[in-house]
Structures are given as structure tokens and as C-alpha cells.
Image (cartoon, grey):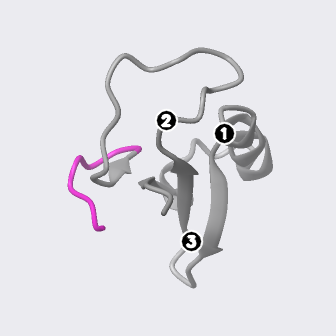
């Protein structure tokens, strides 16, 4: 069975001129896959633990959600 790590990005917190699609493309280049974007503009992403990142490997991997801004996360 695969193990996953999770992340959420609050698209509302982006600077006014930032493009959300560019941010999501950058995350995709690092191995993140969008699971869903909620109606409140929160993007939920996942990536497989142990799979090497295309840009650089992280020294430690977390199975707990990471957030782009607030530090508290879900599953």
C-alpha cells in the first residue's frame, strides 16, 4: 500500500497579481498532485512518500498535512 503526504494551499492568500495556476504547476513539478479545490479556494494536494522529487529530495518527509500559510492542517 502506498503512503501519502498531504498539503493544502489557500489560494485566497496569494498576492493579487499572482497566478494560482502557476503556483499549482510549480507544486506539480515537485511531485504534488491536486486532489481537489474546495469552494472556499483551498487546494488539497498529495504526493507519494518515498518517491524522489523531480527537483530535490526532502531530508525528512511528513505524513501530516502541511499548509502554505497557517501551519495547522488536516489529514
Does residue 21 appear left or right of residue 53 in this picture? right
Residue occupying the far front of the picture: 1
Where is residue 74? Give x, y as percent: 28, 67
Left or right relative to 26: residue 71: left
Q: Quadrant of residue 27?
A: top right
Marks 2/1 in contact by CB < 8 Å: the verdict is: no
Q: Is residue 8 positioned above or below 41 on the image?
A: above
Q: Which mark is residue 41?
A: 3
The correct choice, above or below, for 61 with respect to 33 in the image is above
Magenta residues, as a range? 68-75
Instruction: Tell me where residue 20 appears, x and y as whole percent.
Output: 71, 51
For mark 3, give the secondary structure: loop
Q: At 62% across and 69% down in the image, what residue appears?
A: 35
Q: Nearer the viewer, residue 60 or 21?
A: 60
Residue in the picture at 30% in, 41% down = 62
Residue on which the image places disc 1:
31
Q: Residue furthest bottom?
A: 39
- Identified at 56% across, 71% down, the residue is 41
Residue 40 seen: yes
Q: Between tags 2 and 3, which lies in front?
A: 2
Give the x, y percent position of residue 36. Answer: 62, 74
Amino acid at each position: 500500500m502506498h503512503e501519502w503526504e498531504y498539503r493544502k494551499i489557500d489560494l485566497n492568500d496569494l498576492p493579487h497579481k499572482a497566478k494560482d495556476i502557476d503556483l499549482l504547476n510549480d507544486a506539480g513539478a515537485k511531485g504534488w498532485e491536486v486532489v481537489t479545490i474546495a469552494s472556499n479556494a483551498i487546494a488539497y494536494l498529495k504526493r507519494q512518500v518515498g518517491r524522489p522529487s523531480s527537483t530535490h529530495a526532502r531530508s525528512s518527509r511528513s505524513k501530516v498535512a502541511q499548509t502554505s500559510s497557517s501551519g495547522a492542517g488536516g489529514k
